[in-house]
Image (cartoon, grey):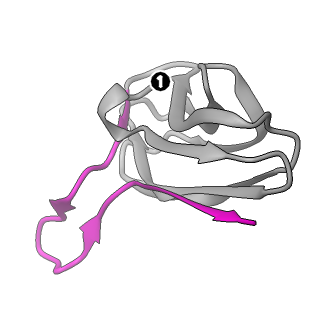
Amino acid sequence: ELNTEIRVEFVAWDDEAVLVVVSGSVSNSGVSGTTFTSIGIDDTNQERTAATSTGSGAAEVFPVGITLITTLSEAYHYATVLGAVGAGTGTWEGDAYVANTTAVRSTFLTGQIQG
C-alpha cells in the first residue's frame, strides 16, 4: 500500500456496483526496473487489474487501472493504491510540477457507487 492516507472509504450495500479508478504517473530509477500499480479493496491483496511500466529513469504515465466490483458484502470498505517494483526505486507522483513545463503529474484514486 503506497500510503494509508489516500484510502477511499465507503459503505456498500449488496445491490450496488462499485467502480474504483486509479490513474497517474510513476517513475523508476532503473532502466531495467519494472513498476507495478494496482488497486486493493479492504487489504493489500491485488484486485483483478494492474498497470505495469518499465523503467527509463524518467516519469511515465501509467495506464488507467479500473476495477468494477459487484460482489462486495454489505459493509464498510476501503480502496487503496498498491505499488511494487521489480528493480530500481519506484516513485508515484504527487502534485508536482515538472521542470521547464507547466504540467502537473499526480496520482489519483477515485470511486463511484451506483445503487
The one of 50 and 99 positioned closer to us in this rendering:
50
The one of 81 and 61 positioned closer to us in this rendering:
81
Q: Position of residue 44 (x, y in %)?
A: 60, 19
Q: Position of residue 62 (x, y in %)?
A: 56, 55
The amino acid beneath tag 1 is Glu
Whether residue 37 appears in magenta in the rendering, the answer is: no
Q: Could you tell whether 104 is left or right of 84 in the image?
A: left
Q: Position of residue 48 (x, y in %)?
A: 82, 39
Q: Residue at x 36, y 50 (%)?
A: 58
Mark 1 highlights which residue? 1
Under circle 1, the secondary element is loop
Q: Could you tell whether 84 is left or right of 46 in the image?
A: left
The one of 10 and 42 positioned closer to us in this rendering:
10
Extreme residue in the bottom direction? 102
Residue range corresponding to the magenta coloring? 90-115
Question: Compared with residue 48, is residue 94 higher up or lower down, i.e. above or below?
Answer: below
Q: Residue at x 12, y 65 (%)?
A: 99
Question: Compared with residue 113, is residue 69 higher up or lower down, i.e. above or below?
Answer: above
Picture mark count? 1
Whether residue 114 appears in magenta in the rendering, the answer is: yes
Extreme residue in the left direction? 100
Which quadrant does the C terminus fall into? bottom right
Q: Residue at x 88, y 41 (%)?
A: 71
Question: Compared with residue 32, is residue 115 higher up or lower down, i.e. above or below?
Answer: below
Q: Quadrant of residue 107?
A: bottom left
* Residue 33 seen in this snapshot: no
Q: Position of residue 78 (x, y in %)?
A: 54, 35
Label 1 neighbourhood size at 10 Å, few (<14), some (14-19), many (20+)?
Answer: some
Q: Residue at x 43, y 29 (%)?
A: 30
* Residue 15 seen in this snapshot: yes
Question: Compared with residue 35, is residue 20 higher up or lower down, i.e. above or below?
Answer: below
